[in-house]
Image (cartoon, rainbow, N blue to C red):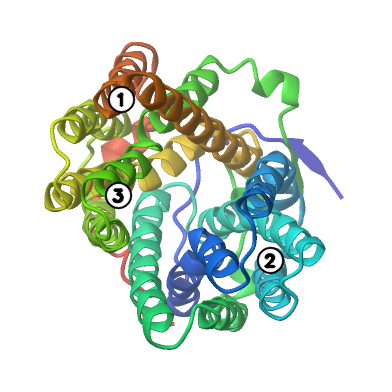
Amino acid sequence: MSSRPCEPPAGGESAKSPSGRSLRGLDGLNFLMADVRDGLGPFLSVYLKGTQHWGSGNIGLVMAASGIAAAICQIPAGLLVDAVRAKRLLIAISGLLVAAGCLLIAFFPKLPTVLAAQITLGAASAIIPPCLAALSLGIVGHRLLPARISRNESFNHAGNFMAALLAGALGQYVGVIWLFYLICGFAVASAVVVLLIKPNEIDHELARGSESPAEDGARHHPVAFSELWKKRDLKVFIISVVLFHFGNAAMLPLAGQVIAKTHPGMDVIALSACVIAAQLVMVGVAAVVGRAMRKGIGRKKIFLVALAVLPVRGVLFAMTSSPYAVVAIQLLDGLAAGIFGVIAVVIASDLMRGTGRFNLAQGLMALAVGVGAALSNVTGGYVVEKFGFTAGFLTLSAIGGLALIFFAVFMPETTPREDSTAAQGTGSQDLIPTPP
């Protein structure tokens, strides 16, 4: 069996025409996995504190365990997704592991069990996003990937919106423990929906970022790590992702603290309203970003819009403590995060095109997100404690301004030339599932 390096072929990648069944499978996975890949999130602390009467120290320990496990597993998860061909099985197993972890916590809420379950949830959550991106790239190919990622994010945010509504209703009227069953239901459904994707339509060489499809079972040689890290554009992009989340992640938690301090009793409902409103905005933004890329607007210009929102949002948060104003300002996060969810994956695909390391780049990007979020929360909390909320928001705003300048100056446009040339003629057939 022959093998060859991941070099761009003379003719480039031929257009792919996946079946409507596989495309609907991707739609369903992104909708259902929106709730599964995030696990229990803040609802776990509510359950452990309010129902099981845990101490804050143990709650903090198990909450941190999931985040640490996810951070450690990001790069290995990317390597695993690049290496294996049973991607449908991998994503189904990851979802079922989340379901099993939730049931363990619900039925055995003891420290060792919850700690082990949270570590499992963190590891599984590291696998799901790169696996979804790899399936998308392997099914539609590089040229149609921007539109596909846009559609993925629309379904993802719609799934988050529906999950937030169901979680709020179940938690309020039935009991917090039903949130565990809700996630289990989504996880089992996702394991069934993945069967809609036809395995023979997944090109596993394209799925790992190779420039051309596999022919006669041949495999490409991925680029060595040492060569990959020499790519200046990749390093600039990863630093930009860190700075984006450094400026962004702590803003909403700090705004929640402001509301809790100035309007006691309105913090939970205001934060719920923020999440739901932002998710609704993200659904529309993801679709608009896809249309913008099809019209030939460059990735860099689109990402600059998201970066430009950060300083404005921070300044506005510094000027108000009204719960209604906070919800309105949070709509800007829907704009910025909606753009980031689409464009970051597409830029990673552009940078990794021909390297065979697309999913490793997804792991690096996820790790950068985690690092940026951690820096944001630590820095924001320290500044607020020492100098007050206004100083905290302005500090995060300044970091957002730094991210904007850094990306504008050092990051080149990544849109492939042939994609720009063909942008006007692609239409929307890559977004709408066609009958098989």
Circle on res. 388: 1
Q: Are marks 1 and 2 in contact (CB under 8 Å)?
A: no
Q: Amino acid at mark 3?
A: Ala
User: Which sits in the foreground, 85 or 376?
Assistant: 376
Q: Mark 2 against mark 3, which lies toward the viewer?
A: 3
Q: Measuring from the top left, give residue 334's x and y in whole percent.
A: 26, 49
Circle on res. 94: 2
For the image shown, how many numbered marks are present on the structure?
Answer: 3
Q: Mark 1 against mark 2, which lies toward the viewer?
A: 1
User: Which sits in the foreground, 186 or 46?
Assistant: 46
Residue highlighted by disc 3:
260
**Against 263, is 308 above or below?**
above
Q: Measuring from the top left, give residue 270's x and y in whole percent.
A: 24, 58
Location of the C terminus (image quadrant): bottom left
Which element carries disc 3, helix, strand or loop? helix
Which element carries disc 1, helix, strand or loop? loop
Regarding residue 423, the answer to whether it shows in the image is: no
Q: Is 136 left or right of 393, judged from the image as shown?
A: right
Instruction: Bin the neighbour count of mark 1 within 10 Å (Cα to Cα): few under 14, some 14-19, many 20 and up.
Output: few
